[in-house]
Structures are given as structure tokens and as C-alpha cells.
Image: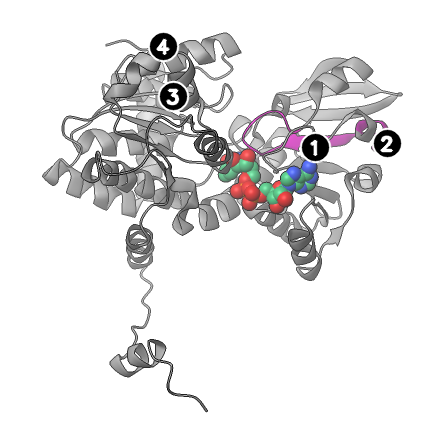
Amino acid sequence: MNFDIRDASLAHAGRLRMEWADRSMPVLRQIRDRFAQEKPLRGMRIAACLHVTTETGNLMRTLVAGGAEAAVCASNPLSTQDEVAAALVKEYGIPTFAIKGEDNETYYRHVNAALEIKPTITMDDGADLVTTVFSKRTELIPNVIGGTEETTTGVIRLKSMEADHVLKYPIVAVNDAQTKHMFDNRYGTGQSTMDGIIRATNVLVAGARVVVCGYGWCGRGVAMRARGLGARVIVVEVDPIKALEAIMDGYEVLPIDEAAKVGAVFITLTGNKNVIRKEHFRVMPDGAIVCNSGHFNVEIDLDGLAKAATGPREARQFVDEWILDRKRVYILGEGRLINLAAAEGHPASVMDMSFANQSLAAEHLVKQAGKLTKAVHKLPDVIDAQVASLKLAAMGARIDELTPAQKKYLASWDEGT
Ligand SMILES: NC(=O)c1ccc[n+]([C@@H]2O[C@H](COP(=O)([O-])OP(=O)(O)OC[C@H]3O[C@@H](n4cnc5c(N)ncnc54)[C@H](O)[C@@H]3O)[C@@H](O)[C@H]2O)c1
């Protein structure tokens, strides 16, 4: 079996961590048990490009339980948990290509190594696998029945491919399931981003001016958690509706030019590039902490900073100090998603739903093989509702059902005042 990991001797530690996460993944566990009986993925070869974390480890086990052959590579050079990579190889026999801190060349070598499985399904987080298949590994396309995509940025890239008529097979946008983005992006990113900032810096959040750039699902979560820790939160947006929502949620909204002058901690979660630029670094207070939790490391203009400032000097692990006009600016995790670089990513309980959706999306692709168009598809609503119901049941929560009279009322138009 081919693999490329940091240290195989970490396998036992990785297994323990995966088991710990699995305690909080009851929905995925149920799916894994069913998959083990029914083998709905028999004959499938799945190449996955995901953050190699404990939760991803449990997803890979689920796909294999379902009868698939699977290989996994990292979807970000800094997000790999080396213990998990070791456990996947040594304890579970799953080809894994991921080393925390790998350079760009190794990253793409690993993407290509995972593709050696000759996938029938691609599973992406950010669309790097699909992009590689479509541009450099086109010989693989005829084997593929479809792919899945985990994150907002990947879905945006894939929809652009669809619009440009270059999408070569159907994609299920797992991110667009409500049981994914409403929970993973909001509560998962909210908690784990603050966790990453705190682990990297030990900064006191109470009283600090925290600038949240982007008030989408992720930004809302981070703003909410920063406020919970006592921060004075400022939101930066380009969308008038989101900005209005932020104001009515009780936050101050400022353009980045103004926010840059007063912030102590800056967090980008826009999925866009160059949100914080050289001119903003210049006006930041001394000692500003700047990080990103959006998918790619393009949100902070680090090239612009490097041209204008001296550095970097490693002040602590994951903290680079730059000097600009005699002031210090601290960049966390080289501008890569801080929740995965300096912390452990989302808690398992929320990834439970995201990866339940991934597993069911793979099953959906098998059931629909040959029937889906070369477009970005939603996961069917019934799957979304099923994941929510399983999660509620696992939490011991019960809800009401419509009475027959209520069902009839909601379907009719003739009853008024
Ligand atoms: N860190 C993680 O673990 C994690 C988890 C989920 C998603 N993500 C990534 O986080 C990013 C955001 O995801 P989302 O689901 O919140 O997306 P979203 O589309 O819901 O929100 C993005 C927001 O950013 C705003 N925006 C765009 N350009 C901006 C600019 N220049 N300045 C200020 N605001 C701007 C948009 O108007 C939008 O409201 C994506 O890259 C996504 O892939 C990261």
C-alpha cells in the first residue's frame, strides 16, 4: 500500500483520538453500521481530499465499511493531524497522503497520489481534486460517476466551472445541505476559530476589539462566539443585507479602512481575496493579531505585507511577527485557516452531520449513477431532514408532528379569518 505520512509510530495515538471523536458522532456511526450491512458503496473507489482530522478518519472508516476502496490526501498543507494520518495507514489500512506543514509541491504530489486509486467518486473540500482531474488528469474522467464538495469556496469554484461548461461530471454540493452549513460553518467555525486564536496567542478576548470580515455563515458564528467571550465586535461586509443583519444583531459595522485603525484582532471569513491589504496593515494599532478562517490563504495579502514590512520572526508557534512603520503585526498560521492550523478544527459533534451528509451523498451518487447532469446538485431535502432527525434523536430531543387537520390547513387556501 502506498502512503506518505510524517511518522507511522503515531498510529496508536491517532486511533485513540479518532475513537474519542467517534463518541460524539452518533449519526455517522449509525450510517457506518448500516453501510457495513448493506455495502451500498461496493465496487466504488473514492479519492478524498479533506482536512485529515479525527472526524475525517471516521468518515473514511464509514466509506470503507460501505464497501468502497478509499484513499485520502490533505485539503490544506497545515490542517493535517499527523497522528490521524498514521492511524489511517497503520490501523485502518487506508492509503493516506498528508503531512502537517507540507509545502505546495508536496501538497499537489499528494493530491496526485490519492488519484492513483482511479476514483469512481471524488470527495473534495475546496475543489482541488476536481481541478486537478479536469486540468491534468483528464484520463481519469471516464471512470468517475460524480463528486461531492464540502465547503462554500469549493461550491463557488464548481458553480463557475458549470457556468463555463467545463464541469465534466455531476457534483453534489454537501455544503449546501442545511444540516451542513447552518451548523458546521456557523457553530463549528465559530467555536474552533476562537479556539485557534486563543491557542496560538493566549490573547484575552474580553474587552478586545475583534474585527470579523465577512458576515456569512462562518462570520456569524465567529462574531457570536467572540461576543460571548466579551469582545467588542466590529463586522466588515460588502453585502448590504448581511451588513444590515449584523447591525440588527447588535454589532458595529465599519468599512475595513476604518476597522483597521481600531481592531486588536482581525479574522477574515469571506472566501474572497485581498480583504486585508498593505494599506490596512499600515494603520493597525501596534500588536494587531491578524488571521484567516476562510478556505484559502488568499484573504490576507501576505505578499503585500512582505514587500512593505520586515520579518517574519516566529514569536510563538503559529505566530509570525512583522514590523511595519515601527509597529508590530502578528500573522497567525501563515494566513491559513486558523481553526485547523492552530487548533483541532470543528468539534466532532458538528462534523457528525457534515460527514453523515458526505456519506449519504456518496450513496446518492451510486444510486443516481448516470442519471445526474454535469452540474452542481443539491443533496435531496429528504436526506437533509433525515440527518437532522437522526441528530435530534441522538441528542434525546423530541419534536411534534403535524396533526391531520394542521396538514390539511397548511395545504389549503380557502380558510381565512
Ligand atoms: N475554517 C473552516 O473550518 C471553514 C468551515 C466552513 C467554511 N469555511 C470557508 O469560510 C469561507 C466563508 O464561508 P461561508 O460559508 O461563511 O460563506 P458565505 O458566502 O456565507 O459568507 C461569506 C461572506 O463574506 C462576504 N464578503 C465577500 N467579500 C468580502 C470582502 N471583501 N469584505 C467583507 N466581506 C466580504 C460576503 O458578502 C458574504 O456575506 C469560505 O471560504 C468557506 O469555504 C471555512
Residue corresponding to mark 3: 83
Looking at the image, is mark 4 or mark 1 earlier in the sequence? 4
Looking at the image, is mark 4 or mark 2 earlier in the sequence? 4
Q: Classify 224 as above or below 401.
A: above
- Disc 2 residue type (three-letter): Val
Q: Which mark is residue 283?
A: 2
Q: Residue furthest front?
A: 165
For this view, does 66 lie left or right of residue 253?
A: left
Residue corresponding to mark 1: 275
Per the rendered image, the range of residues in magenta is 281-299
Residue corresponding to mark 4: 4
CB within 8 Å, label 4 to label 1: no
Mark 3 vs mark 1, foreground winner is: 1
For this view, does 273 lie left or right of residue 288?
A: left
The Cα–Cα distance between marks 3 and 1, rounded to whole angstroms, is 34 Å
Does the magenta portion include 381? Answer: no
SS class, disc 1: loop
- Disc 3 residue type (three-letter): Glu
The Cα–Cα distance between marks 2 and 1, rounded to whole angstroms, is 15 Å
Looking at the image, is mark 2 or mark 3 earlier in the sequence? 3
Name which residue lies at 82% across and 16% down: 308
Q: In the image shown, does 153 or 320 lie closer to the viewer? A: 153
SS class, disc 4: loop
Q: Respond yes or no on whether mark 3 lies under 8 Å from ligand 1.
A: no
